[in-house]
Image: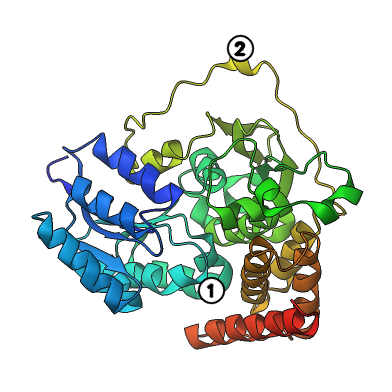
Amino acid sequence: MSRVQQVTVLGATGSIGLSTLDVIARHPDRYQVFALSGFSRLKELFALCVRHTPRFAVVPQAAIARDLQDELRAAGLRTEVLVGEEGLCQVAADPEVDAVMAAIVGAAGLRPTLAAVHAGKKILLANKEALVMSGALFMQAVRKSGSLLLPVDSEHNAIFQCMPGDFARGLGQVGVRRILLTASGGPFLHTPLSELEHVSPEQACAHPNWSMGRKISVDSASMMNKGLELIEACWLFDAKPAQVEVVIHPQSVIHSLVDYIDGSVLAQLGNPDMRTPIANALSWPQRIDSGVAPLDLFAIARLDFQAPDEQRFPCLRLARQAAEAGASAPATLNAANEVAVAAFLEGRIRYPEIASIIEEVLNREPVVAVDELDAVFSADARARELTGQWLKRHGR
């Protein structure tokens, strides 16, 4: 590699962002941090700027930007602080940037990620909501710009590694029968259904295998995260929802599998550490050290599998329905889930009500075509409004 690659990390203070920076720091001869963004963990963002000396940092508000800029100057750093969505789009599309880690959680990551796509960057996609909300538009933009899109979710990266190189021709054309998307089952896999009514946000965030942010941890507990990944897999690999099967695998060692028509099933295995898929995407088509310990099969000893129970995980059923409906339905699903999960984390609703709210919003909101980005954000806004009405109507 003749030149050090410049990398923008959107969502630098989250778990994916921090893992990305860990991998980058292991390879200073290959990668350099160009820009970092943070939303609420601003002390952490300052510390990351001190360590990685980026050209730019991006924060949500002007007042915060002024304070951070003063602190950085006092520390002798030349990092320039930018503000808001405009700043995010700027550092995602800057001509000097080679790769963008898209790790902002939720709908807020869509525009900056698209800015990187339109600029033809190498996209390391961890923000699944970008594809869930605007799959057709997003993939059309990728094809038009020639951007290189590489999945970072451990499941999608596993599928990517197990697919033939020409999978873009279509699954049927390359001999793939189906995609097997693995899921841990989260913290409530064996909890009696009668007890789910009383689980706390802390219990929902206590994932047995992965260290993640609070929102995505709740999504993992409800398996909405797997539902969103199902939708994402359909767009990434040009698959129909019926070609993607979810398999509960509690050990989280097999990250996903690809089933071929000749009876072969290829799987990608590894310790549950996001640095593996990050390193794979960052260095593709090469391989670099991620810092992850080798997999010890003798210590694992066994690998278990089971079908998901939709009574226990109704969010998975709702996500599959949205995938099959297409158009605006996935954006509606995602927005309703974001608001409902936030309300649960704030203690305003009970855990089972997350799925109840989403189902009501999906039933109330008609499915419409989304042939432009404004239509995507309109569906998103309408779903948030309907979810807010549910909360207000129920005194939450």
Q: Is residue 32 visible?
A: no
Residue 330 x, y percent position in the rendering: 65, 71
Q: Residue furthest right?
A: 194
Give the mark toward the camera: 2 or 1.
2
Q: Quadrant of the N terminus?
A: top left
Dot 2 corresponds to which residue? 298
Q: Residue at x 80, y 37 (%)?
A: 306
Q: Residue at x 25, y 67 (%)?
A: 91
Q: Residue at x 76, y 77 (%)?
A: 362
* Front-most of residues 311 and 52: 52
Q: What colouring method underlies this structural image?
A: rainbow
Location of residue 166 with respect to 95 vertically, above or below: above
Residue 66 x, y percent position in the rendering: 22, 73
* Front-most of residues 12 and 165: 12
The quarter of the displayed image where residue 135 is located:
bottom right
Dot 1 corresponds to which residue? 134
Label 2 vs 1, first from the N-terminus: 1
* Front-most of residues 347 and 164: 347
Distance Cα–Cα, label 2 vs label 1: 43 Å
Residue 29 x, y percent position in the rendering: 16, 37
Other residues around mark 1 within 10 Å, as few (<14) / some (14–19) / many (≥20)? many
What amino acid is found at the position of numbered circle 1 in the picture?
Answer: Ser
In the picture, measured across the screen, residue 167 lies left or right of residue 182, that is: left
Q: Quadrant of the C terminus?
A: bottom right
Other residues around mark 2 within 10 Å, as few (<14) / some (14–19) / many (≥20)? few
In the picture, measured across the screen, residue 75 lies left or right of residue 94, that is: left
What amino acid is found at the position of numbered circle 2 in the picture?
Answer: Phe
Q: Is residue 36 visible?
A: yes
Query: Does dot 1 land on a helix, a strand or a loop?
Result: helix
